Image (spheres, rainbow, N blue to C red):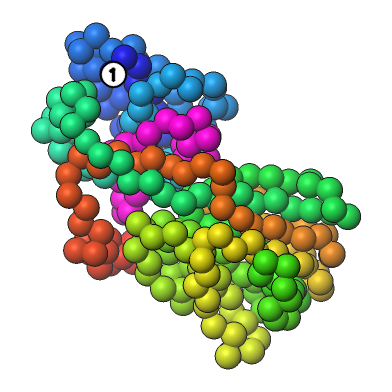
Amino acid sequence: MKKVLLINNQNRPETESVAQEMAGKLAKYNLEVIRRHAFSPPVQIEDADLAIVLGGDGTILRTARYYAVMGIPLLGINMGRIGFLSKLELSEVDEYLEPLIKGQYSFSERLMLDCQVLKHGEVVFQSYCLNEVAFRSTSPLMVGFDLEIDGQLTANYRGDGMIVSTPTGSTGYSLSCGGPITDPDIEVLLITPIAPHASYKRPMVLDASKRVAIKYLSGVDAAVCVDGQVQTALEIDQVIKVSPAPFKLKMIKLKPSLFFYQIEARIRRSED
């Protein structure tokens, strides 16, 4: 290991002091440390051995969108409220830092999505995401839309919108709208309606190879939002296409995964 990308959330002042301290520890191992803030524009650093992210789940989501495409493995250290995506708590850093430097870890590969908005067949918006693509009304009124799967019209919907989620995102917005909790190590797409007018329109689980398209047909105002962070307004007849990204996020595993053991406690923490 030669080069480490160290990212912290500058909107949380406590992460700045921790980042400075960690940069000093990494430098003692003769590593080149590149400091970046989570909200700074990404830089091309394809030769970094890994990215250490200090912050909460939002910081990790933003980092994944920026750097997963470069193939940089990511280690999240929880300094937020919930920590669904973090692999270490701050109190565990000293215990696991040396094994990390020595490469004593494995990878968990996470499915990411490619979201495109098309107008008359031309792409007018594109973004990758780790958790979900959410199409939704931005007014109190319902929107009408068609759902296509692999080019086949599946159903017409009226309601507040639709979420297309990865297994990683199953514990986020999708869960709050009635979607299932899904093992993050499998590759599926979760389709979760948001407050559908027809109560029989239920969530669906699709093979990750499927291509999903949502056509916005009616409503006053609507938008598409990826990972709850990047949003663009939509126009009638625009189409949202969602497919697997051509790469996966590599998440570093330094200790056994306790996803199913920890899930209830973390959901309770998010509700508190």
Left or right of 120 in this view: 186:
left
Residue depicted at x 84% and y 64%: 237
Numbered marks: total: 1
Residue depicted at x 33% and y 54%: 84
Residue depicted at x 40% and y 17%: 34
Q: Residues within 10 Å of mark 1 (few under 14, many from 20)?
A: some
Residue 106 location, quadrant: top left
Up/down of 175 relative to 242, above or below: below
Left or right of 11 in this view: 42:
right
Instruction: Look at the numbered disc 1 and give the secondary structure of its residue.
Output: loop
Farthest residue, direction right: 120
Closer-to-camera residue (104/219): 104
Q: Is residue 137 visible?
A: no
Q: Position of residue 172 (x, y in %)?
A: 44, 62
Farthest residue, direction left: 95
Residue 59 location, quadrant: top left
Closer-to-camera residue (94/12): 94
The answer to whether residue 190 is magenta is no
The stretch in magenta equals 62-86
User: Looking at numbered disc 1 in the image, what kind of residue is underneath it?
Assistant: Met
- Please identify the quadrant where the N terminus is shown: top left
Q: Which residue is mark 1?
A: 1
Left or right of 271 in this view: 177:
right
Q: Position of residue 260 (x, y in %)?
A: 24, 64
Q: Position of residue 263 (x, y in %)?
A: 27, 64
Q: Is residue 25 visible?
A: yes
Residue depicted at x 34% and y 63%: 183
Closer-to-camera residue (8/180): 180
Q: Position of residue 32 (x, y in %)?
A: 33, 12
Residue 167 location, quadrant: bottom left
